[in-house]
Amino acid sequence: MNPALALAGALVAASLIGPVPARAQAASAVCSFNFDDGIIKPGLRSTARVSADWQAGPAPIFCAGTVDGRRISGPGVIFEYGTLDGTCGQGTGMGWQIVTLPTEKGPIRIENAAPFSWTGPGGTLEGPRMHGTFQLWPTEGDCFTRPVTRYGQATQTVLRSAD
């Protein structure tokens, strides 16, 4: 993905996520990342609720701003994994995000535990370091004749500095 387009997308996404608390505005970054390799085991179905494990990445993450007193200087890498409970139509889960970002003072590693929920193809995540929105689409399975076992994801977040 073109970094300039990703950055522009991240800035537009920030306007969709909503306002950042005043205390965090000076020490936060707007980020976007996309996965096309997500795996759900076992897969999600249209009506039968399942408990499953999932993972996605590693993938590039594009952020603009400052985090933990450091200006982000380029694209980083994100990996996610977790558990979920639900159907193709709705559910909840817990995810863990591991992010490495280059900064003007050297790389920074961020770990974020983020509860999330979805209804239809979209959802929200809210962790202590990252909060935002995501869109999902199946890449293997269709929910009706075969469970969705692989997925793509587009995510827009605000990355907060540690307190």
Image (cartoon, rainbow, N blue to C red):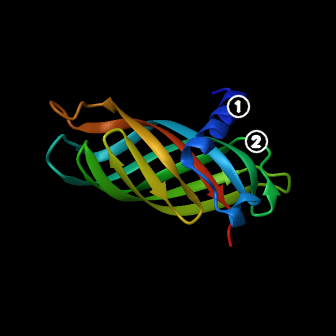
What residue is pinned by disc 1?
Answer: 3
Q: Residue furthest right?
A: 104
Q: Quadrant of the C terminus?
A: bottom right
Q: Is residue 23 above or below residue 103?
A: below
Inter-mark Cα distance, 1 to 2: 8 Å
**What residue is rendered at 56% in x and 42% in y?**
16
Q: Locate residue 2, reporting x and y percent.
A: 68, 26
Label 1 close to label 2 by CB (< 8 Å): yes
Q: Which amino acid lies under the numbered mark 1 shown in the image of this protein?
A: Pro
**Mark toward the start of the polypeptide (1 vs 2):** 1
Where in the figure is residue 128, as x and y percent of width and height? 56, 66
Q: Position of residue 85 (x, y in %)?
A: 27, 56
Mark 2, other Cα within 10 Å: few <14 / some 14–19 / many ≥20: some
Query: What residue is shown at x 51% (from left), y 43% (from top)?
Result: 57
* Label 2 sits on residue: 74
Height in image: 41 above or below 110?
above
In the image, residue 20 above or below residue 62: below
Q: Is residue 59 visible?
A: no
Label 2 sits on a secondary structure element that is loop
Question: In the drawing, what numbered circle is on residue 97?
Answer: none
Residue 147 picture quarter: top left
Front one among 6 and 75: 6
Q: Residue at x 23, y 47 (%)?
A: 87
